[in-house]
Image: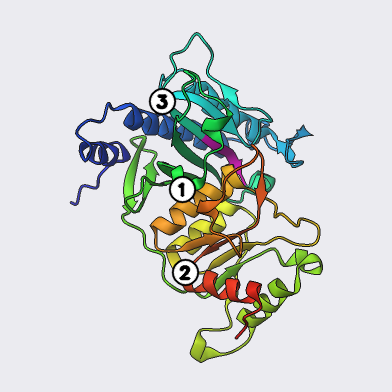
Amino acid sequence: MIRRHTLTEHIMQEQRKYPGASGGFTGLLSDIATASKIIAREVRQAGLGNILGAAGSTNVSGDEVKKLDLIAHEIFVNVLERTGHLCIMASEEDEDPITIPDRFPAGKYVFVFDPLDGSSNIDANVSVGTIFSIFRKISTDERGGMVDILQPASEQICAGYIVYGSSTLFVYTVGHGVHGFTLDPTIGEYILSHEDIRMPDQGQVFSINEGNRSRWFDYTSDYVDWIKSSVPDEGRPYTARYIGSLVADFHRNLLYGGIFLYPEDRENPNGKLRLLYEAAPIAFLAEQAGGLATTGETSIRSIEPAELHQKVSLIVGSRNDVLAYERFRRGDRP
């Protein structure tokens, strides 16, 4: 019988590569995993505990807040604020930064997260997930500040997501490849199931909300028509697969190749996805797996955030597919 590494063991192995490491980062990742297990339990029991449906409010981005959004947000805050590893947090569900209360020690890391991406699908039992980034504190303020949160994606030291679906999967990178761990509920541990994930250079799946076509710019419409055209020698037509949960759509394309598009359009000229909570961590993961992530013009990893809930367009996936979209964006079409 082959014994596979647990997430805890994998994190410890990574720590040994840095002899001077204090163990704080290792502890933080373990705490994130603990919070995700609690959320996985809540998601599984949502229909039984009357926590499906809307919470009766909208968040700062104008999206309807679901009950599970708030529960996931509170779980992460309650678990992580007391660990001593963080100086500050930011959540897609909170208008302002989340400070660490004075009664808890402050650490040297920054945690930025979307507690439950895709929650509009939760009532239909569709996979949802958590997306997160970790940065080092760069300010001299013991408990951090906005400057610590508004760092470009290139400064991330870790990014990851957790998929809550038919199984619970924890995927993360610290800049040495992308690894996935599946939760074994019988022992309560994440077990290495996807080691060193590599995204194919080109896929045959595209993910985009075609319901928005009427407001797309011409280059997006032309690109989608192109990948749907029948040219078997070039691997076309592509197959359409769109779940409406970024975590689920990206995870599929990460494993099998393809492209996810949420481009700017006439209604959202700056894009619609959140830079800090969605685009930046997904970009780090994609590039570590051999893919690309851009706005269609600019690398996501190079953007300097200007505000907490800044929105961008996101084109992410297999390298050749993203480059092809960029050609259409420039007007250099095949």
Residue where numbered disc 1 is placed: 154
In which quadrant is the C terminus drawn? bottom right
Percent of width and height locating residue 242: 63, 63
Among numbered discs 1 and 3, the one appearing first in the sequence: 3
Q: Residue at x 46, y 57 (%)?
A: 286
Q: Residue at x 58, y 43 (%)?
A: 276
Residue where numbered disc 2 is placed: 319
Residue where numbered disc 3 is placed: 108
Per the image, label 3 sits on a secondary structure element best described as loop
Q: Residue at x 75, y 57 (%)?
A: 269
Q: Nearer the viewer, residue 219 or 43?
A: 219
Q: Nearer the viewer, residue 300 or 130?
A: 300
Q: Quadrant of residue 101?
A: top right
- At label 1, the amino acid type is Ser
Q: Quadrant of residue 184?
A: top left
Residue 115 colored magenta?
A: yes
Q: Residue at x 32, y 56 (%)?
A: 196
State whether residue 73 is above or below residue 218: above
Residue 328 colored magenta?
A: no
Range of residues picked out in magenta: 112-117
